[in-house]
Image (cartoon, rainbow, N blue to C red):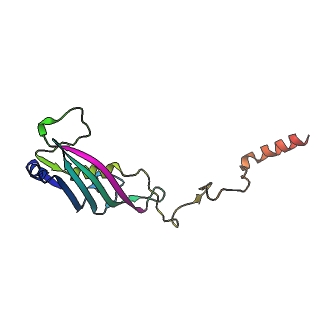
Amino acid sequence: MKWSLMQLNKLRNLGQLQVNETIELNELVALHPDIRAVQPVHVRANASFTSNQLIFNLRITGEMTLPDARTLNDVAYPFEIESIEPFLLEVDAVSNEADDINVPIGNTVDLRPLVQELILLHVPVQVHGDDEENQLVEGEGWTILSEEDPEETEPKIDPRLAGLAQFFKKDQDS
């Protein structure tokens, strides 16, 4: 997934460049504190040439291991990222206005750092696993309420305020 500008100029005559590779990105574990592991990532791309750009239509699929937001157990999180990424083929034609255009590093176009960046941008803030056995649903003084099981019982009165409830009953009786 790395080409020199000279190789790309030769491929320009063919009209289109296609990428279909599986890569290891274990360095993502060190780059993001929540990522515990990354399975091999599949990268597919169709690239088309314009006058001075190479435009990649990327599709990145894979799976990473993240901590569960409630239990901190490992959760497998599959991801699928689609992105359109243009690369400028003329090194000297860099514009200050074009922040969304990628520039070759040296004389090479490398997709690996771009794929890493896109995956890091799509790491979710919270992940919840399906392991319901180990999830805490209640503790001392609290319970988790869900929309499926609305609590229909009468609300419990705080024992510190029980005397106040009796005060209002006496007031209503008189």
Q: Would you say residue 107 is visible in this rendering?
A: yes
Q: Quadrant of residue 37?
A: bottom left
Task: Point out the image quarter for the C terminus.
Answer: top right
Q: Is residue 27 magenta?
A: no
Residue at 11%, 44% (x, y): give it. 106
Q: Position of residue 132 (x, y in %)?
A: 52, 65
Q: Would you say residue 26 is visible in this rendering?
A: no
Report the residue that reaches farthest toward the right.
Answer: 174
Residue at 18%, 56% (x, y): give it. 1
Report the residue that reaches farthest toward the top.
Answer: 96
Instruction: Give the left or right position of residue 42, taking residue 16 as reference.
Output: right
Which of the pair 90/67 is nearer the observer?
90
Which of the pair 8/129 is nearer the observer?
8
Instruction: Give the left or right position of residue 58, taking residue 72 as reference.
Output: left
Instruction: Give the left or right position of residue 118, taking residue 3 as reference.
Output: right
Residue at 32%, 59% (x, y): give it. 61
Task: In the rendered view, tell whether residue 104 sits above or below residue 136.
Answer: above
Q: Magenta stretch?
A: 73-88
Q: How many marks?
A: 0
Which of the pair 114/172 is nearer the observer?
114
Instruction: Give the left or right position of residue 98, taking residue 89 as reference.
Output: right
Q: Position of residue 122 (x, y in %)?
A: 35, 50
Q: Is residue 75 magenta?
A: yes
Q: Position of residue 135 (x, y in %)?
A: 52, 62
Report the residue that reaches farthest toward the bottom.
Answer: 133
Magenta residues: mostly which secondary structure? strand
